[in-house]
Amino acid sequence: MTVSLNKFPEDNRGVVENIAPAYPTLFGLTVTPVVGGILAAVTGLFAASWIYLNLVQPAQQQANQLAQEVDDLRNRAEQQAASLRQIGLQQQQLANARAQQRVVQSFFASPATLDTLLLEINGQVRRVAGLQLQSYLPKESSIVTDGSFGEGVNNKLKQTPVFVEVSGGFNQTVALLRGLEQLQPLLLVQDVVVTAEPVPIVVTPKGQILPRPAPKLTTQFNVVALSPLTPEEQKKAEEAAAAAAGNQPNQGGGNQPNQESGNAGNNASQ
């Protein structure tokens, strides 16, 4: 067996040397593997840029806009929830204030209790043994405007006084006043005047001075019942107060020219 060291015969050597790789040509440019790789990279970069500009970026902007809208809606919902909680708190506070107002108003006199006030005072006097009712006289009701019970209740309460005169001992008088404090409506005892009848000194024939009995007291006072004004009465009272406050400067300004004219006349006469 014979082994030849020549891979190709010598006759075909020129043919092999004339064989060259064939590459495509694009616009007069031979597209070699390197050139093809560069063209593919550029094409891919351009395609990626086009996709980003025309598809990804608008979608991202839309997503950002939707996220902003969602945040706005969430903030609005939280604000509305906070407003609802605030409204609920204010409604609860209003309900508590109205409940407190009803409790406070229950202590004041009502038209029904005012109608029976004289009977209740008479009943309290009759319950105390040894106490006599000399007279009682209801007076005309008036609106509280002098601030005697605080500036906050001016033109909101009216007072109905009842003049009472009783006679009896000290203990009986105190028992009556305590009984009036226990009545259901809110009553005030004002202008108390106590007069004691003189008790003579008794001397026995042996010169001993007998102990004097307790003097009989005559007590006069006013029982004042306080009651809230009705909405109509309160409105009229506020309008009257506003009218009085508006007329004060006009009256002062109107009197000043008269005083000046009067002074001028006095100076002229002098």
Image (spheres, rainbow, N blue to C red):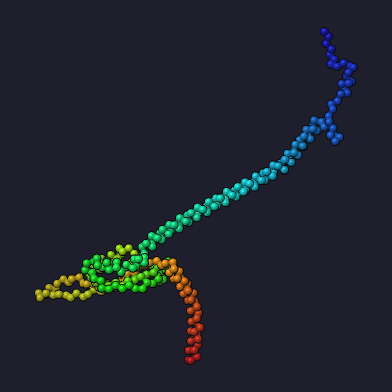
Horizontal side of residue 198 vs 120, given as left or right: left
Horizontal side of residue 3 vs 183, given as left or right: right
User: What is the quadrant of the N terminus in the image?
Assistant: top right
Residue 228, image x and y in percent? 39, 66
Name the image quarter holding residue 18. top right
Residue lying farthest top? 1
Horizontal side of residue 143 vs 207, given as left or right: right
Name which residue lies at 64% across and 47% down.
Answer: 65
Residue lying farthest left? 206
Query: Looking at the image, which is closer to me, 33 or 6?
Result: 33
Residue 21, image x and y in percent? 84, 26
Name which residue lies at 47% across and 71% down.
Answer: 239
Horizontal side of residue 52 vs 205, given as left or right: right
Name which residue lies at 72% across and 43% down.
Answer: 54
Name which residue lies at 18% across and 71% down.
Answer: 213
Residue 65 appears in the rendering: yes
When the figure is inspected, residue 30 is found, relative to residue 170, above or below; the finding is above
